[in-house]
């Protein structure tokens, strides 16, 4: 049976990703949609990318661009160093790539460059790392960085009056454009949740793998959820982004 599974922010936690995929029991017919932020956090950032490159040879994989992926790509490509990036997990990616050959780095650069900013499936479900701001939809977005930096979409869904019908003139226009929206970027642990959270029609799959949380995947049809162990327990000698 074919499944479409969305997977949240990994942040270098390869051990958690392998554990999660074993829990899901993926088969070659499954489609995997990764919501971005593969790097910056635990020590296996570069190894996560290599693993995903190989995984795409077996499964249909859709790789979305996260803000941390963009920052790491810029460093790999041009040497650009962002001080805030270094403070929020970037150093772990620098360390992870330290012993990689130029050939390996070239294949990883190709991976970063081929990521998508967003993906819309045949059922009009949007998959994006962070969000979008244009009321006419992501196709009309002015600045592509919003796809992997925006937090206003999730904040809008969080703050929305649950009694407000979708037909009301005050109902957020962005939320009416899609059947469902799947995002990562902002850990649900910030609202004291441990599993993927749905607010309005927005599903947030980032369950804080970079910090004290687990790595999560969700079947976008059945809404069945799988999770790894808390990632920090798989890397007991590291701090991640804690």
Image: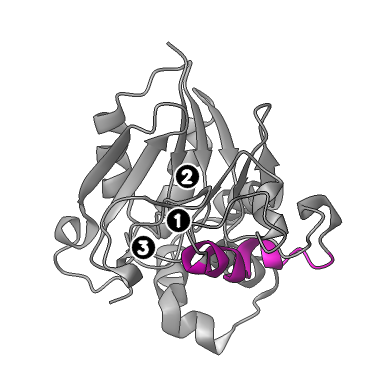
Give the quadrant of the C terminus. bottom left
Mark 2 touches mark 1? (CB < 8 Å): yes
Task: Kindly state the secondary structure of the residue where label 1 is placed.
Answer: helix
Classed neighbour count for the residue bearing mark 1: other residues with Cα under 10 Å, few (<14), some (14–19), many (≥20): many
Q: Residue at x 62, y 63 (%)?
A: 148
Between residue 43 and residue 136, name the one nearer to us: 136
Q: How did the renderer colour the structure?
A: one colour
| Real-space Cα separation, disc 2 to disc 3, in angstroms | 27 Å
Q: How far across and how far down the image is residue 182, in percent?
A: 53, 47
Between residue 170 and residue 108, name the one nearer to us: 170
Checking the image for residue 46, the label placed there is 1
- The residue pinned by badge 2 equals 50
Asked if 37 appears above or below 122 in the picture, the reply is below
Task: Kindly state the secondary structure of the residue where label 3 is placed.
Answer: helix
Between residue 107 and residue 52, name the one nearer to us: 52
| Residue, far top | 1
Q: How far across and how far down the image is residue 89, in percent?
A: 42, 74
Between residue 8 and residue 48, name the one nearer to us: 8
**Quarter-of-image position of residue 70:** bottom right
Q: Residue at x 50, y 64 (%)?
A: 161
Task: Kindly state the secondary structure of the residue where label 2 is placed.
Answer: helix
Who comes first in sequence, dot 1 or dot 3?
A: 1
Q: How far across and how far down the image is residue 21, in percent?
A: 32, 33
Magenta part of the protein: which range? Answer: 142-159
| Real-space Cα separation, disc 1 to disc 3, in angstroms | 25 Å
Asked if 49 appears above or below 208 in the picture, the reply is above
- The residue pinned by badge 3 equals 188
């Amino acid at each position: 049976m074919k499944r479409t599974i969305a997977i949240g922010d990994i942040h270098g936690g390869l051990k958690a990703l392998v554990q999660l995929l074993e829990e899901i029991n993926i088969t070659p017919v499954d489609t995997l949609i990764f919501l971005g932020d593969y790097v910056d956090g635990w020590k296996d950032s570069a190894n996560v990318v290599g693993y995903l490159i190989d995984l795409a040879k077996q499964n249909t994989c859709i790789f979305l661009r996260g803000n941390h992926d963009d920052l790491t790509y810029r460093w790999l490509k041009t040497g650009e160093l962002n001080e805030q990036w270094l403070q929020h997990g970037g150093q772990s990616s620098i360390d992870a790539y330290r012993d990689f050959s130029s050939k390996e780095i070239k294949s990883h650069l190709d991976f970063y460059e081929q990521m998508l900013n967003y993906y819309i499936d045949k059922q009009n479900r949007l998959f994006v790392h962070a969000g979008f701001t244009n009321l006419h939809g992501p196709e009309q977005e002015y600045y592509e960085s919003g796809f992997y930096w925006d937090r206003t979409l999730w904040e809008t869904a969080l703050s929305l009056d649950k009694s407000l019908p979708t037909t009301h003139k005050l109902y957020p226009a962005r939320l009416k454009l899609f059947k469902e929206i799947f995002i990562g970027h902002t850990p649900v642990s910030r609202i004291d949740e441990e599993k993927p959270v749905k607010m309005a029609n927005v599903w947030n799959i980032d369950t804080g793998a970079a910090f004290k949380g687990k790595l999560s995947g969700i079947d976008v049809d059945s809404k069945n959820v799988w999770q790894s162990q808390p990632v920090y327990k798989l890397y007991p000698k590291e701090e991640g982004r804690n």
